[in-house]
Amino acid sequence: MRKYFAALLVFLIIFQMINLENESTALAGDKFRKLPNHAFTVGEKLTFAVKYGFVTAGIATMAIPRLKKISGRDVYNITFDVNSVPSFDWIYKVRDHYETYLDVEGLFPWRFEQHIREGHYSRDFSAFFDQRNGKAKTTGGEYKIPEYVNDIVSAFYYARTLDYSKLKVNDYIHLQNFYKDSVYNLEVKYLGKERVTVTAGTFNCIVVEPIVQKGGLFKSEGSIYVWLSDDELKIPVKVKTKVLIGAIDADLTSYEGLAGPLKSKVN
């Protein structure tokens, strides 16, 4: 009996080594796109005050704390958190967490997570993007996806790497975003340039309007405007969401670990 189990163990080890060798060969043969990125890097952390009118209702952070490996690829582990401040919790408590794993060379996602805690509402969603076979494997099922499809967070970071210098006002950038069980068009409308002042300073910015159908991070009920620093980094300086009653602003309060000099900052 011991000989039988010993032989079986040897067989399993050999079988596993063959699988690993085949997987290594397959990964080595990947022909994914390679895109330049001078906008962000590991260690970047951006902090925002979320305001409703003159009231600070929450704090938001966007961070790239580490590199990881997924499916044999180096990925940026990107997190986005929104928390209401304690003084606002009794009105509407928010504890939202998003996470994406963005391919370092190709700037497309391999995994996305969403954990929503807003008032009495909660939602948990995750998706693994099998970019080799064109499938999204989610908590709700398996779905076909186009090449290099984004989630809403990876789409934002990818958009930071694009060149806006040749765009005219009202030009569009066309992206695709997967959420829940479907692929949606994600249009980014270029609105021009503007100088804005926030807690973190005064910046020359480019202004864009994401036209989002669905995706959880941005709601479709109102307009969204994003001010990005007018330099290679294109960090978000200000976000304004117009809702039925008033507007919600997210203003940059601090930043660290940037990929390069913030040339758009005036003071």
Image (cartoon, rainbow, N blue to C red):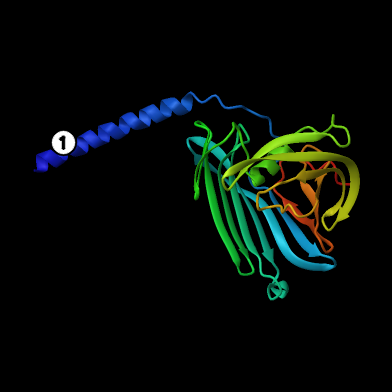
Say if 114 sits above or below 42 in the image.
below
What residue appears at the point 83 percent right and 58 percent down from the top-left corner? 199
Say if 130 sits above or below 96 in the image.
above
Q: Considering the numbered disc 1 on the image, is that residue within a helix, a strand or a loop?
A: helix
Which of the 4 image quarters holds residue 262? Answer: top right
What residue appears at the point 87 percent right and 41 percent down from the top-left corner? 191
Q: Which residue of the protein is positioned furthest toward the left in this rendering?
A: 1
Which residue in the structure is indicated by mark 1?
Answer: 7
Q: Position of residue 208 (x, y in %)?
A: 82, 43
Q: Position of residue 167 (x, y in %)?
A: 84, 31
Which of the 4 image quarters holds residue 18? Answer: top left
The foreground one among 60 and 249 is 249
What residue appears at the point 36 percent right and 32 percent down from the top-left corner? 20
Q: Residues within 10 Å of mark 1 (few under 14, many from 20)?
A: few
Can residue 39 be seen here? The reply is: no
Say if 142 sits above or below 89 in the image.
above
Amino acid type indicated by mark 1: Ala
The foreground one among 141 and 257 is 141
Can residue 135 be seen here? The reply is: yes
Q: Quadrant of the N terminus?
A: top left
Which of the 4 image quarters holds residue 103? Answer: top right
In the rendered picture of this protein, how many numbered marks are placed on residues?
A: 1
What residue appears at the point 84 percent right and 31 percent down from the top-left corner? 165
Q: Position of residue 171 (x, y in %)?
A: 84, 34
Q: Position of residue 2 (x, y in %)?
A: 10, 43
The foreground one among 135 and 161 is 135
The foreground one among 239 and 145 is 145
